[in-house]
Image (spheres, grey):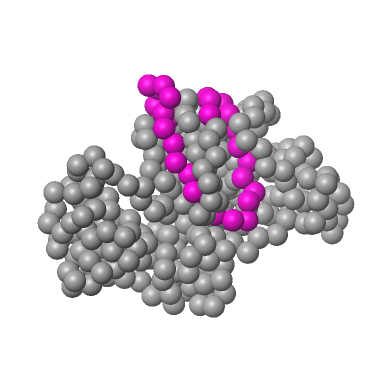
Amino acid sequence: MIHRGEGAAWKDLLVEIHTRPPVGRAMLIPAVAEPQLIWQISGRVLCEDRELGGSWNAHSVEPNDLFLVTSPEPYELRWRAMAPEPMVVMHATLGLHCLASAAREWSGEGSRIPRLKEFNGIQDPTILAFLEMLRKELTLQPRASGAFVHGIAQSLAAHLVRTYRDENDPRPHRSTALPAYPLHRVLSMMEGALQEGVSIGALATAVDLSESHFSRMFKGSTGFSPSRYFIRLRISKAQELLRETKMPIIEIGLEVGYTSPSHFAHVFRKETGWSPHEYRERMHSGRGMEDFSRIAIE
């Protein structure tokens, strides 16, 4: 990630700009409560996505292609660059209160947020203009204007509600997933605690939820319980270190919170089907395998 909207000015939407490597290994994209816009700023890419455990679906992505993700389920994503230009992507996650305001304006007081139709690889000049203004506010202004950002967020919400509401599905928007900001907070806590660990209680407290409610919503976002997710996060980091460094396996185990080498080897084999040594040997010999998804909020 190269830019992220921080502070009070960005309270209405979560905006991030990412650069991507030419080849992206499988990544789990969590579901969040809010609709998410994705703008391919630059780079021609072959992307593949799938539901968890499903078959891969391939599609090409060109500069200025837009995507609207409203799925209540997490999904996996991987990609490969098709041209030498750098791959730069913006993600904009709209706050539900902006969409609720747009729904009331469109359909009257008491209206619920409508379901929005997902779109893939379209070019909508109105959305592109709004996202370009957000990009400049994020990257060029020394201090973002809350009024400016709020105005664009509300304008985006109004455009989505009146242009992309699903007329064939009158049910209101619903989600059992965590909102983007709380999910981002707990994922960051987990990623920063690979060595020492973190309790479900601490994660739930950080987002002002009970442990049981947090666990249900976290599983709605990621497809995994918090404890299962954390194990996968640790093993994913271990895979990265085995693949990209020459660190001794014992040190890698310690780096991801396993003080017992035998316990680390047992958990690694249970998650991947290989011992840490076998995994490293296969990766370095060119007989690589598909890792299970790294988990990230995008």
- Residue 84 relative to residue 287: left or right: right
172 in the magenta segment: no
Could you tell me how many numbered marks the image carries? 0
**Image spot of residue 143 (x, y percent):** 47, 40
Say whether residue 71 is magenta: yes
Q: Nearer the viewer, residue 278 or 248?
A: 278
Q: Position of residue 36 (x, y in %)?
A: 60, 45
In the image, 57 versus 123, the foreground residue is 57
Viewer-closest of 254 and 265 = 265
Frontmost residue, 260 versus 114? 260
Q: Answer with left or right where residue 238 lies relative to residue 87.
A: left
User: Residue at point 33% right, 56% down?
Assistant: 236
Q: Is residue 132 above or below residue 52?
A: above
Give the x, y percent position of residue 104: 81, 51
- Quick check: 150 above or below 174? above
Q: Residue visible at 18% across and 56% down?
A: 277
Question: Who's the residue at 24% across and 39% down the image?
Answer: 286
Q: Is residue 69 visible?
A: yes
Residue 142: in sight, yes or no?
no
Q: Residue furthest right?
A: 108
Quadrant for the N terminus, please: top left
- Place residue 261 in its image quadrant: bottom left
In this rendering, would 8 be left or right of 98? left
Which residues fall within the magenta stretch? 60-87
In the figure, residue 160 lies in which quadrant?
A: top right
Q: Locate residue 158 relative to residue 286 in the image: left or right.
A: right
* Horizontal and vertical percent position of residue 290: 36, 47
